[in-house]
Image (tube, rainbow, N blue to C red):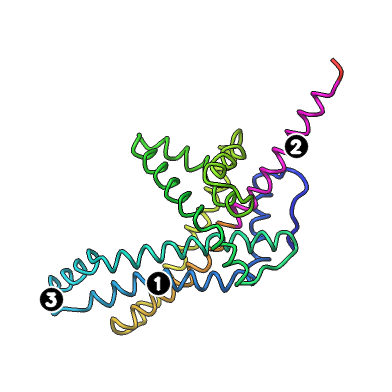
Amino acid sequence: MYSRPTGPRSIGAVLDDAVRLYRESFRAILPLLIVSAVLALVPTLVLGVNSTFGATQAERMNALLRLMTSPSYWITMMVMWVVNLVLYGALFGAIDAVARGERMGFGAAVQLGLSRLPTMFVVALLFGLAIGIGFCLLVIPGIYLMGVFQLVFIAVILEKAGIFGAFGASFHLIKGYWWRSTVIVTVAVIVLVVLGILLSVVAGFLTVLSVGAGTLLVVNQAVSALLNIVIVGWMPCVLLAMYYDLKLRHEGQDLASRVDALAPR
């Protein structure tokens, strides 16, 4: 059973909290995860179907090139990106509700994501731009900015922060804890990589047993969908567990500062 911490936690304890939060909230967020996984399959399926057109390899490559350079393809990708932003915000809201001992239904979660979509949209663009520029500047600034601003979407959803307020809130929370936060996220990503490798091995084994290109495509997409369901739900839980811990740490620091200011000199 997950319960929100009442005091600062160690790195290992934050990751344990993320695991418990993930396990506790999985059933509540499963509809959101399924929708997200189905959306993630659309580009691959479209490209896979079009790659079968044409008698020769050159004809198939030309068909793919025409598809990927068509306005309709990129409009579809943009719409899917926007829908995924809504789902991402909905996930944070639904998981946070579980952490508070409540339940947020699919409709309420999506409505929350929709209500914060304009801010999420601009924040996502600015976040990507900042990280991209940072990586162009010898990589290190990009890594630093990625760590500093990794809680911007939580600030938008849970704190109803505006565009610049979200970046400021994330910077404030991460300030002084950059290395700690980076270690937590890195360990969480390693867990995903290991899981991805295991599922890839399973997919490879099933591929050997499958017969025909159609069966191969179905197997690969089924494994990909399963992996997406697991991955999409895991990282929000990690970020929320870290967010709760950092909030407690900063609240403790603020309280200590106020007590120190009231102490006689």
State the residue at coordinates (47%, 37%).
144
Callout 2 environment at 10 Å: few (<14), some (14 to 19), or many (20+)? some
Residue 46: percent from the left, percent from the top?
A: 31, 74
Provide the residue span drawn in magenta: 237-263
> Nearer the N terminus, badge 3 or badge 2?
3
User: Magenta-highlighted stretch: main secondary structure?
Assistant: helix
State the residue at coordinates (55%, 70%).
32
Residue 231 seen in the current view: no
Callout 1 environment at 10 Å: few (<14), some (14 to 19), or many (20+)? some
As drawn, the residue found furthest toward the right would be 264
User: Which image quarter holds the N terminus?
Assistant: bottom right
Residue at mark 3? 56
State the residue at coordinates (34%, 69%).
43
User: Can residue 251 be found in the magenta stretch?
Assistant: yes
- Tell me the kind of residue under disc 1: Leu
Callout 2: SS: helix
Residue 180: percent from the left, percent from the top?
A: 59, 40
Residue at mark 1? 41
Please count the marks in the image.
3
Q: Nearer the viewer, residue 226 or 40?
A: 40
Residue at mark 2? 252
